[in-house]
Image (spheres, rainbow, N blue to C red):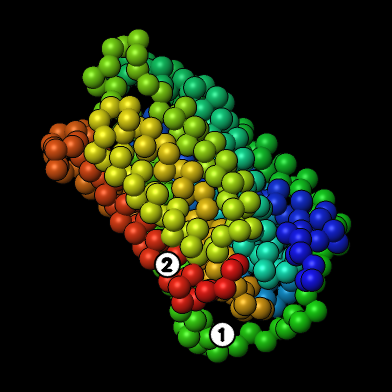
Amino acid sequence: MKEKQKIIEKKYLIVFILITSLFALWGFANDMTNPMVSAFKKILKELSNTEASLIQLAFYGGYATMAIPAALFIKKFSYKSGILVGLSLYAIGALLFYPAASYEAFGFFLAALYILTFGLAFLETTANPFVLSMGSPETATRRLNLAQSFNPIGSLSGMLVAQLYIISALKSDDYDSVAYNMLSSAEQAVVRANDLQIIRNPYVILGLFVIIMLAVLAFVKMPRKEDQNHDLNFKQTVKRFRSSKRYYEGVIAQVFYVGAQIMVWTFIFQYVDVLNESRAADQQLTATWYNMSAMILFLTGRAICTYLLKFINSGRLLMIFAILAIVATAGAIFLPGMAGLFSLVAISIFMSLMFPTIYGIALRDLGEDAKLASAGLVMAIVGGALMPPLQGRILDIGGDKFNDVLIMGVPEVNFSYILPMLCFVVVAVYGYRSFKYHLPEKS
């Protein structure tokens, strides 16, 4: 009888624990940074909404810029080298928030964030295929789902830090435009400097923590695959990717999934604003807590899916969860009041499976090519930059508010979730093709 494959072999356990901590590190940065668009707009009154949104462009631009260079680097050197470079860039970007706050220059903050996400691109491009390689190919997707379970823990922590130590502490938020303009120039300068330091401090602390992680990982011996080669025939490698439908369809599915994820989590604030319009002052809802509830469901879903993948083909489970996400999104669009909000929050448990499972399916059996192939899946994160502006345009159909007009009988913000729904259709199709054609065997 064939011995049952373990998710994590004992010889990889320490390294696996250290690498999975990195998943929490980039989750923390992601979700601490998301509210900064709003924070900078409040502090730097001269910024337009478009200029404040450059934070998102800098963040996702860093991923898009550095994913392929990171993949080429780890293909030539090693996974460990990629991790150390990634942590170095992460720390440098975070620490640059200190001089950025001193100079009070928004462009400096953007540059710091751009460099920080160079590091995140290195870490994601390296850590995902590294985890897949730590053991049997039969358990690779389950192993990556387990590692990715630490990502929402970091995300949840980032949300808490942003809400409790940045957003709620901003002095700029204590003044409306009239009251702020009544302050003297000196008083405005004090408020501005104070708030930029409030933003600065968590990033500097994060940078120092990343340096500690860098020192620890630098002295840890990591496995190096025996079949590692240094042939960087980029053109031939890309040609092999183009011949793999499972891979390039996976990149497409990942673009749409990441776009859906960012839309679902970003516009929950506008969704709650519309609900609050019909509620009394003492019954107002706080969007942050519902967003955190969604993240808790996301984390729970990761744990459940790691177990379910033991029994269910990864492509089949991906399709099932995508269909359930479509149903939940339809609820967010068409169900009134709190039922719609609960449906919106529930989408997260069905999204939990998607990123690591698409990743695992797409990279399966690519061997050393997985290092470069992972770059395409990391670059797919750019879907998070491309999709939300389209949803924002739907919100602007009737005016500046979120329910200026009804579309198909529902407010604009509700109808805008048609875009994530369409994204989940793409994911469902990929899941179906994966178990029907690409990976018909149990995985």
Local secondary structure at mark 2: helix
Q: Residue at x 47, y 27 (%)?
A: 289
Evaluate if marks 1 and 2 touch, with contact meaning CB atoms under 8 Å apart.
no
Disc number placed over residue 409 in the picture, else none: none
Please name the residue shown 44% across and 56% down the image: 320
Circle 2 residue: 432
Q: Quadrant of residue 129?
A: bottom right
**Residue at 54% across, 36% down:** 296
- In the rendered structure, which amino acid carries the disc numbered 2? Tyr
Q: Tell which residue pokes out farthest to the top in this image.
A: 282
Q: Residues within 10 Å of mark 1 (few under 14, many from 20)?
A: some
Mark 1 or 2, nearer chain start: 1
Residue 15 image position (x, y, % from top left)? 80, 57
Residue ID for mark 1:
237
Give the x, y percent position of residue 388: 34, 50
**Whole-percent x, y for residue 101 in the image:** 55, 36
The front one of 57 and 146 is 146
Q: Is residue 283 left or right of residue 107?
A: left
Q: Is residue 370 above or below residue 391?
A: below
> For the C terminus, which image quadrant?
bottom right
Q: CA distance from mark 1 to mark 2?
A: 27 Å
Q: Position of residue 240 (x, y in %)?
A: 53, 86
Q: Nearer the viewer, residue 75 or 145?
A: 145
Q: Of 127 and 84, which appears nearest the observer?
A: 127
Residue 44 seen: no
Mark 2: few, some, or many residues within 10 Å (few <14, many ≥20)?
some
Q: Which residue is located at x 38 percent, y 32 percent?
A: 342
- The quadrant the N terminus occupies is bottom right
Residue 323 in sight from this viewpoint: yes
Q: Amino acid at mark 1?
A: Thr
